[in-house]
Amino acid sequence: MPSLAKLQKALLHDIYTDSFESLTYLDERIPDIKGRLNIYKNNTRLNLVDTLKNIYPVTLQLVGDEFFKTMARHYIKQVPMEGGNRNAYGAGFSAFISSFKGADSLPYLSDMAKLEYAYFKMGLAEGREPLTHEGLQAALEQDGDVKIALNKHVCLVKIDFNVNDLWVLHQLDSADYSSFELSLNPFSILILRDASYMTWMKALDTGTAEFLEHIQSGKSFAESMQFAMENQSNLENLQIDFGYLMNHQSFIQLNGEKTND
Amino acid sequence: MTDTLKKSGVGLRHPHMQELLLGQSPVGFLEAHSENYFGGGLAREQLIKISKMYPVTLHGVGLSLGRSDGLDKNHLKQLKALIDEVNPVFVSEHLTWSGYSHTHVPDLLPLPFTNEALDTFVDHVKEFQDTLGRQVLVENPSNYLAFKDLDFTETEFLNLVAERSGCGLLLDINNIVVSAQNLGYSAEDYVDEITDSGAVKQFHLAGYEVRDLEDGAQLYLDTHGHPVYPEVWELYKRALRRLGDTPTLIEWDMDIPALSVLEKEAAQADGVRAEIKREHSHAVAS
């Protein structure tokens, strides 16, 4: 019998590939050991395909079950599960799709996956103590360079195609897809889970997106707001967006710590 | 026995959440899969509410107690945070492993029952218990293959884990039937070999699926997608007779039926427990 580490490494390698190296450690008196090892291979594949289907339901609808499973199987071989929590799997699926040859004709598909992953992730995120209006005002009075960050249940996603509109159509019981026109027009989507555990998507004006990008890059609140105001054609929109974000506990104050990204 | 778990329980599954939140189910307790409630969000909030209405046990599937390269501290931290918030009656994990280094599987893999694996497993159970500040239960797995050149049988290994770490045991009766069929040993002997030192704190019951093999043999798959089979009920009786009345849970994870179906299975388990208790009383009286 090899060391436990060697055996575990061999068995995991077999499960994620087509190899059967660990057969040598198995009790050959048990019939069909190759078939039995396949049970673990199949379980892993089926469970992870199901995990991806659960995270990416619209991507699945767009390409159909067979094509989705093909993409998923390639992804699983390339990217094994890293930890013991299945809900943490699948973060890189969007990037994988963008380089998956079979999906060449669907250039918007990786944007949809990017959106869906963020939506799924926000649904499970654990929020931190939010920055209140009063807290922000007090912090600004104390320190003009105050830094804030997005709370964990809020994120910004940059997409190239207007897949957010397509995503909305897919949430409806009966949607009229004829009115939808795909367009290439890069912009930012805010994804936010509210206090009643509903997750929302909102397309952002350039100014608000600039503001959030700057605070995420470590710029102070004042600097970020300045950038936003310079880029926002309609300042009222910036005010509305900022109010919306504050009302949904979207920020935390940073005290020398890094952002949540 | 834990007084709060005198009635049998069922696994907490998403399709039943709204019905259970009404607080009207007659089940004795609910068992949640720990990893499904990591982080925040609606599911966790619902579990907290449920834990105020019913006794809850937490059953982990991802800690990988048998891994050879140390426990995942981040996973342990998240598990502890959940346990502190839910305050479950029991916390359980498996006599298996599922990861090494940065590669995991969403499955419970068999351990080689060697001295090295025993030392590793016991150390990890101790670390788990020390981190939580409480006893945990370890469940026997369902197996489809076995390793060669072993130092122990599964029951010897399980008993030694309990003895050396001070953990409790969760005896899954369905898993015993499945593994016995697949690996060619006696399910009855397995039950008879489990320590009667009081370490067994909980039973699991479930249904398996039968697959016919080309050579005419049958493979049992632990799918948790059927009612409890007669041979599992029979083995359950044997376990109750030998180990005494023990909190029992009905597991059902595939093709999940209405809650009432699970409640009926739990009531059947209660009936069996009452029958064995009566048998025991008559034996003592005579």
Image (cartoon, coloured by chain):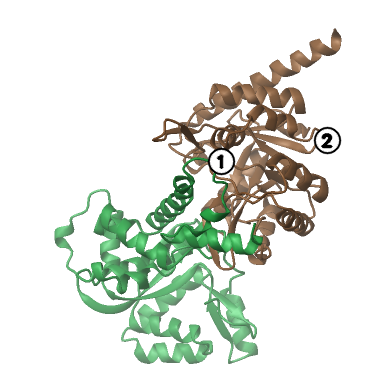
Chain colours: A green, B brown
- The image shows a total of numbered marks equal to 2
The amino acid type, in three-letter code, at marker 2 is Ser
Quarter in which the N terminus of chain B is drawn: top right
Secondary structure under tag 1 reads: loop
Q: Distance between the Cα atoms at labels 2 and 1? A: 30 Å
Report the side of B59 relative to B212 (left or right).
right
Which chain is indicated by disc 1? B
Which chain is indicated by disc 2? B
Asked if one can make out residue A11 in the rendered structure from this viewpoint, the answer is yes
Question: Which x, y percent locates residue B281?
Answer: 80, 14
Of residues B171 and B40, the one nearer the viewer is B171
Report the side of B131 relative to B23 (left or right).
right
In the image, which is nearer the foreground, mark 2 or mark 1?
Answer: 2
Location of mark 1 (residue): B12
Determine the image quadrant of residue B201: top right
Quarter in which the C terminus of chain B is drawn: top right
Question: Which x, y percent locates residue A126?
Answer: 57, 64
Say if B35 sits above or below B282 in the image.
below
Location of mark 2 (residue): B197
Question: Which x, y percent locates residue A189?
Answer: 36, 73
Determine the image quadrant of residue B187: top right
Say if B118 sits above or below B252 in the image.
below
